[in-house]
């Protein structure tokens, strides 16, 4: 089976690529296809995150696992990830600038119009020169700091703490 995937850059402009890839390929092969389709730096680290219909961040699947026994992209088959309609992926490339993408299956096909897979079948929008600012917070971090968003708003007023005259 061929997975027709839509990969959307998390940006205020519409920027996406459609990729056809064999569902028996690994997430590492998908990673290389995304890097190629969006002309990203091949040398940067990356990770996929399991997600759902609400785009909530789930379990991380890194390019290279840092813990013994952890899964890596090369260990996971694409077809095993997209085994139900609710599954989506988030992809983060370059953890310093944070290019973040949302990935969903458009459909599964018997054959592709492209002879060599993976292949970019549709390219829409130009990649910006700089990655958008993205706040990357896990659900676990939110549980430990439920007031984080509110406190961030108050930090804007720190400049007034230095004002001693009343």
Image: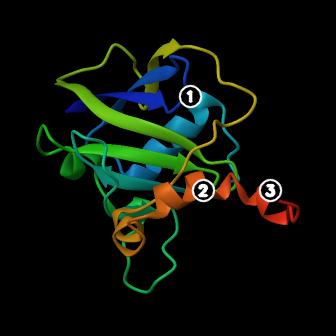
Residue appearing at x 23%, y 21% in the figure: 111
Q: Nearer the viewer, mark 1 or mark 3?
A: 3
On the image, the x and y values in percent for residue 163 come to 86, 60
Looking at marks 1 and 2 on the same chain, the residue that comes earlier in the sequence is marked by 1
Quarter of the image where the C terminus is located: bottom right
User: Looking at the image, is 161 positioned above or below residue 106?
Assistant: below
Location of mark 1 (residue): 37
Q: CA distance from mark 2 to mark 3?
A: 11 Å
Circle 3 packing at 10 Å, graded few (<14), some (14-19), many (20+), is few
Tag 3, which secondary structure?
helix
Work out whether residue 85 or residue 27 is closer to the camera in this orientation and state it: 85
Element assignment for label 1: helix
* Residue 154 disc label: 2
Q: Nearer the viewer, mark 1 or mark 2?
A: 2
**Which residue bears the numbered disc 3?**
159
Left or right of 159: which side holds 119?
Answer: left
């Amino acid at each position: 089976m061929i997975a027709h995937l839509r990969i959307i850059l998390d940006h205020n402009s519409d920027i996406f690529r459609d990729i056809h890839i064999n569902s028996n390929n690994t997430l590492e092969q998908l990673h290389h296809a995304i890097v190629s389709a969006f002309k990203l730096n091949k040398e940067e680290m990356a990770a996929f995150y399991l997600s759902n219909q609400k785009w909530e961040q789930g379990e991380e699947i890194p390019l290279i696992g840092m813990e013994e026994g952890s899964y890596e992209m090369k260990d996971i088959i694409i077809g095993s990830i997209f085994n139900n309609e609710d599954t989506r992926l988030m992809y983060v490339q370059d953890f310093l600038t944070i290019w973040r993408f949302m990935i969903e299956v458009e459909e599964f096909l018997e054959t592709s119009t492209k002879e060599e897979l993976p292949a970019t079948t549709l390219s829409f929008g130009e990649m910006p020169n700089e990655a958008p600012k993205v706040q990357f917070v896990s659900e676990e971090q939110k549980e430990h700091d439920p007031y984080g968003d509110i406190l961030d708003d108050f930090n804007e007023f720190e400049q007034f703490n230095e004002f001693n005259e009343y």
